[in-house]
Amino acid sequence: MNKLISEADRLLKNGGFEYAFCGGHALDLFLGCESRMHGDIDVCVYWDDRNRIIQYMQSQGFEVYEMLGGGRAHHITDVSCQFRARRNIFCFQQGCPLVKTYPPDEDGCCWMEFFHIGQTALDFIEFLFNDKTEEAFEYARNREIVLELGKAVLFRDGIPYLAPELCLLYKSTDIEREGCEQDFELAWKAMDPSQRRWLRNALLREYPGGHPWIDRHKRCN
């Protein structure tokens, strides 16, 4: 088990909100091994818990920033003052080598720069907000694409993680990113037929004009 993920799980389980690791670390939890180095820790959470998450992370010594687009960010010091322009927030501690912030501009916002050098300490967590119903997880980029909650969040050794078919669907928007093809190949081979079928149908719905992964599955069977 990845040491950072175990530490992060111990931190988050006391926060009083639902969560599941996502991105590359989630795929590693699914595979049961560390397939490659990952840039940072990504955590899937729900919009209804946003304020609770912000306040909890602040109580644990993290600075919290919400992204505004184009590299601009807003430092959240009071949950009553938020833009909610994007679905992600970044939480990091002072001295974290993965991120650098610049002095705020006239709007009180700042520029933020990220360094993809690999995370080695529990000093950075990105939270990505999603919606759900009582029965299903809703894909953030197309809420008509849903997956039953019991299939959307899985567990390994008690640690919750987003199902691989959902992780790959999110990754499908940036398949040129380093490691993305490897993630697809490894996860697809390990997924069961129902997971593969859901992902292919979701890709067909999300990309009616075609996507490289829609037919790539044929050589992964």
Image (cartoon, grey):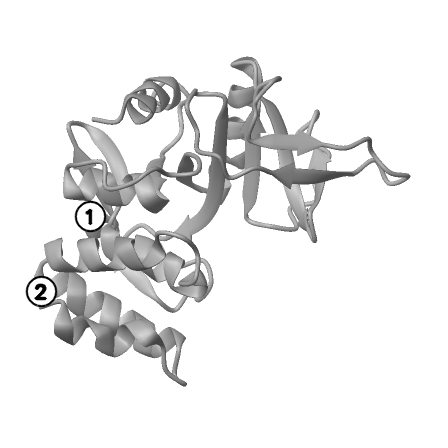
Residue marked by disc 1: 150
Residue 102 x %, y %: 77, 33
Q: Residue at x 66, y 39 (%)?
A: 113
Taking the view exactly as shown, the residue that stands out farthest to the right is: 106
Horizontally, residue 99 falls left or right of residue 216, namely right
**Of helix, strand and loop, which one carries label 2?**
helix
Instruction: Write down the quadrant of residue 188 in the picture.
Output: bottom left
- What is the count of numbered marks? 2
* Rendered residue at 24%/49% (across/down): 163
Instruction: Residue under label 2, please give it.
Output: 193
Residue at disc 1, secondary structure: helix
- Residue type at mark 1: give it: Gly
Q: Is residue 193 left or right of residue 88?
A: left
Q: Quadrant of the N terminus?
A: top left
Say if 145 sits above or below 34 in the image: below
The residue lying at 34 percent from left, 23 percent from top is 4
Q: Position of residue 44 (x, y in %)?
A: 40, 42
Residue 195 visible to an observer of this rendering: yes
Q: Position of residue 141 (x, y in %)?
A: 47, 63
In the rendering, which numbered label is found on residue 187?
none
Image: 206 above or below 37: below
**Picture quadrant where residue 75 is located:** top right
